[in-house]
Amino acid sequence: QLSVQADVRRGAITIEEQVGFANMTFKNGTTAELEFKVVAHFNNTFSVEPAAFTSVLLQVCWILFLLAFLSMLRRDAGILVLDPLRRMLKFVAQYAKNPLTIIKFKEGNDAGTTIVSGDTKKINRGINAANSGNDGTTNDGDGDETTLKENELGSFETEQLITAVSKITDLLRKCWGVAGADIISTNLARQEGSLAEVFNPTVPGKSVYALFAFCAVDGFDRYLRSLEGDIMILINDVASVLHNEVFRWGFGDSGQCNKNLGSAWLMVFRIGNVKEVIKKLEEATHVVFSSSSRGKRTSGRQRSRTMAKRRGSSDSIGSVSTVSSIHSQGTSRSMNTSEHSRSKRKSNRNKSVKAMNLSLKSLPGISNFTDRALIGMLKTFAGIYRDNKLLSWKNDFRLGCGVGVASPLNMIFGMDAGWAVEGAVGSEYKIDATYLSPHVNMASRMMSACKLYGVSILLSEAVHELISVVCQKKLRHLDTVTVKGSIVRQRIYTYDARHKGVDFFLFQRSDEQADEDSDQYTPSIWSTDQDLTAMRQHITDDFLEEFDKGRDEYLAGDWPSAIKHLEAANQIMTENVVEQGYIEDELAELHSRILDGEDAQLAEQELRNETEDGPSCRLLTYMKSEGGVKPSSWKGYRPLMSK
């Protein structure tokens, strides 16, 4: 009863009541109908407890099952949908922040997992190697091809979408390079809390400082006519060597290919944004000169205290003049606003003029930066004469006219340094990310002038000013010129590079070793690197002495004396090349050609052209075309009229 009243054992104790009537006969024989009630108490505890426990256990199991099922659904949703979407947004954010970021996928089942690596040079070479390997891979059976495709694309649609986004951004990066990085960043970046809905390629350009290098295949027309469709293979073989060396030797990630123009390439070594460079230069200047002015501040404080005491005695007089000047300040406030706007515009113009006239030579570390860029060009020169793919083209019967081995492929280079506007040129139908600047045109003029002077590389005076003193000693001043479209008089220089008689394949180094050479760069590399010293081994001190005298006399206007010295220099070069055995193969070929009945004089002249010094011969030809005497209009420089 207590449990019933407390309502704590509901259902455990049950009460059954039964009311009935019965006839009862007494001893006296009388009969009466009596009412009676039967109450029965049943204890169901032993049956209720197991049932209750089982019910609770069943409910707990259902809850755990539902939680496990929901967690599995959540995990699948995270793996298949949410995590890929997060990674996709992370990709976009990373590319928006730095479009030049390289993102590669881990191998394995988790194809969507990525690694963002800072060593873009190694990844670029790894990607190129992987691509070249995939091109040559053959699979037997449809099953292998299906497996390969699944491994490349991923097992799920979201992974395929991530791969597609990564490939698209990678294509944008490779197609537009550094110049298009701002276009990609602007269009992928969030605007007012959401991504840009419309692609706008025509974003404003940026002024930058950079080194510009034009590279071209010499005699491209002959290769094009001979190879026709296979010219693409040859050009890509050349580009592989060029791009690898430029990426490797460019400081950080500065070395990039901006334009593939078929027979020519525009390589850019980006120094930095004009505003950023000027700001950092001003900060460095402030740090340098702030330390020298600290001593002056101490004595200045003492003088200021003395002056403050003197001013204290005249404060009463100064207060009267202050009150009288308040009215004049109020009337001139409106004039100050217009003057402020004019001064702001003048300040912006001054900044632009300062940016265009800034001497890059004042930038810290610019000599190492420029040296590395030049080494990238020279390493490319050496690379084309030891790359197996490029060397195999000599045996192509189409280039050798079916009668022998073709002459090796040759490249020419031109470099200049300065400012440029970096951005997109075009319309909504087609755009090109490029650089607009007279310095880009100057680099192109330097490259074209290589043919005029018979050299492989020409550097402008702007580049010569930026390189290290060690490198400057290795360069040869050829001439002082003005190029077409410019009135600027400048010296032009070359690094004497000769491939005949040099076995560049003996100096072959692996990518890892070459990367280590690049990372451990010091100016002493100009005297220790095997490629750089071997290509210049034909230059002697007596030759340089005669050439410098002839060039100086040529510029001064004493052309008869200049001809004498330049002919002597050319003779020294010819004798040195022959004596050192740099043209043994050419001599053997000349002998066989003469035995075959070919004109000996013509064959000898062709060989002489191979042994003589190109700049000396070109200057001699130019002076002799003018009669050996300077013209009346000679001003100490030569105008180059060709592009």
Image (cartoon, rainbow, N blue to C red):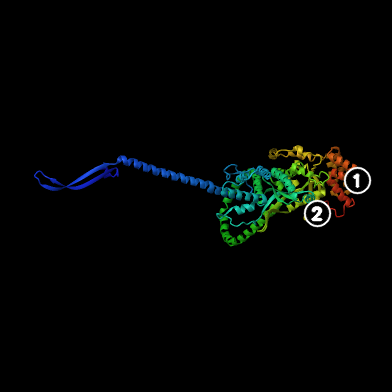
Q: Which mark is residue 200?
A: none
Mark linked to residue 599: 1
- Taking the view exactly as shown, the residue that stands out farthest to the left is 28
Quadrant showing the N terminus: top left
Quarter of the figure that contains the C terminus: bottom right
**Picture quadrant where residue 530 is located:** top right
Q: Secondary structure at mark 1?
A: loop
Can the viewer see residue 184 in this picture?
A: yes
Residue 590 lies, in percent from the top left, at: 87, 42
Q: Which residue is mark 2?
A: 642
| Residue 523 place in picture, x, y as percent | 73, 40
Mark 1 residue type: Asp
Q: Is residue 6 left or right of residue 65?
A: left
| Residue under the image location 34 percent in, 42 percent down | 51
Q: How many marks?
A: 2
Q: Quadrant of residue 605?
A: top right
Residue sitting at x 57%, y 57%? 322
Nearest the viewer among 210 and 267 is: 267
> Who comes first in sequence, dot 1 or dot 2?
1
